[in-house]
Amino acid sequence: MANTKGNLKPATITTTDNSITISCMFNPEHYSVVKKNSFKTNQNTVIPVKPEFKNYGRATLTLSELHFDVYESGDDLTAITNKLWDLMSPTDTEDPNSAPPEVKFKWGTFQFTAVIESLTVKYTLFDKDGEPLRSVVSVTFIQSDNPNTKPHQNPTSGGGPIQEIRKIISGDRLDLIAADVYGDATKWRLIAEYNHILNPKSLRPGQSITIPPLH
């Protein structure tokens, strides 16, 4: 898959044995990694005591908008989404209770090794014959490696810098945005050129623009 419409690199979901690789458009305003440890609390003591540690929890990553679009390419969208369902299927076809495959979600320098807990595929556009052309996927990953391993940003991974996606609010101006993100209001032309904005006064609330990194 080429760069996304916002000119970002696509995200990938790849099995750890590299047998399946799925590219998807991922253009978030944010994403969150959640980790919870377990503690036992005794409410029946007169003197307050510290919670007793039980075990380390595994981090979870929930992504609500992975986009797939074959409107222009003419590819088979169902074949792509079927690969996603394969990631929730037994790895051993002769053992229906075998575990699903371990995967790595990668976007830019971010990498998360996990298994998929839940998956929702929502089809949003169809051709005249009813074949799906676009879909939005929601997926929840559970960390599968050592629970004390931090999901990492690896600057040597070759993914390149991740651009910021910014939603325009009332009163925003490109020079003010440039001053905020770069510390230099004169860099507004860089943002304008990157987003093909011909008239910097044409910004409208709710519009999303990409903030390119400085080189």
Image (cartoon, grey):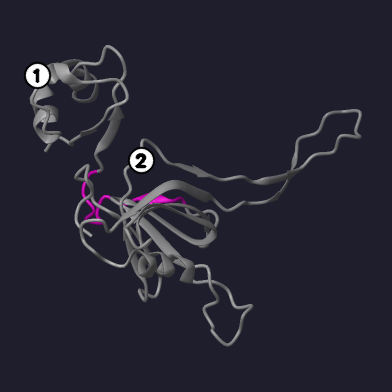
Tell me the SS state at disc 1: helix
Q: Amino acid at mark 1?
A: Thr
Residue sitting at x 15%, y 16%: 201
Q: Nearer the viewer, residue 27 or 51?
A: 27
Asked whether, in this view, residue 120 is left or right of residue 14, the answer is right
For mark 2, what is the residue? 28
Residue 87 position, x and y percent, is 47, 68
Regarding residue 41, the answer to whether it shows in the image is yes
Tell me the quarter of the picture where residue 73 sits.
bottom left
Mark 1 is surrounded, within 10 Å at the Cα level, by few (under 14), some (14 to 19) or many (20 or more) other residues, namely few
Asked whether, in this view, residue 103 is left or right of residue 5, the answer is right
Q: Residue furthest bottom?
A: 94
Q: Amino acid at mark 2?
A: Pro
Locate the C terminus and report the quarter of the image it occupies: top left
Q: What number of labels is visible?
A: 2
Q: Nearer the viewer, residue 54 or 116?
A: 116
Q: Are the two marked residues, 2 and 1, in contact with CB atoms closer than 8 angstroms? A: no
Tell me the quarter of the picture where residue 175 sits.
top left
Locate the N terminus and report the quarter of the image it occupies: bottom left
Question: What is the span of residues highlighted in magenta in the rendered image?
Answer: 150-161
Tell me the SS state at disc 2: loop
For mark 1, what is the residue? 186
Residue sitting at x 23%, y 46%: 8
Mark 2 is surrounded, within 10 Å at the Cα level, by few (under 14), some (14 to 19) or many (20 or more) other residues, namely few
How far apart, in angstroms, are the residues tagged by discs 2 and 1? 26 Å
Residue 50 position, x and y percent, is 76, 35
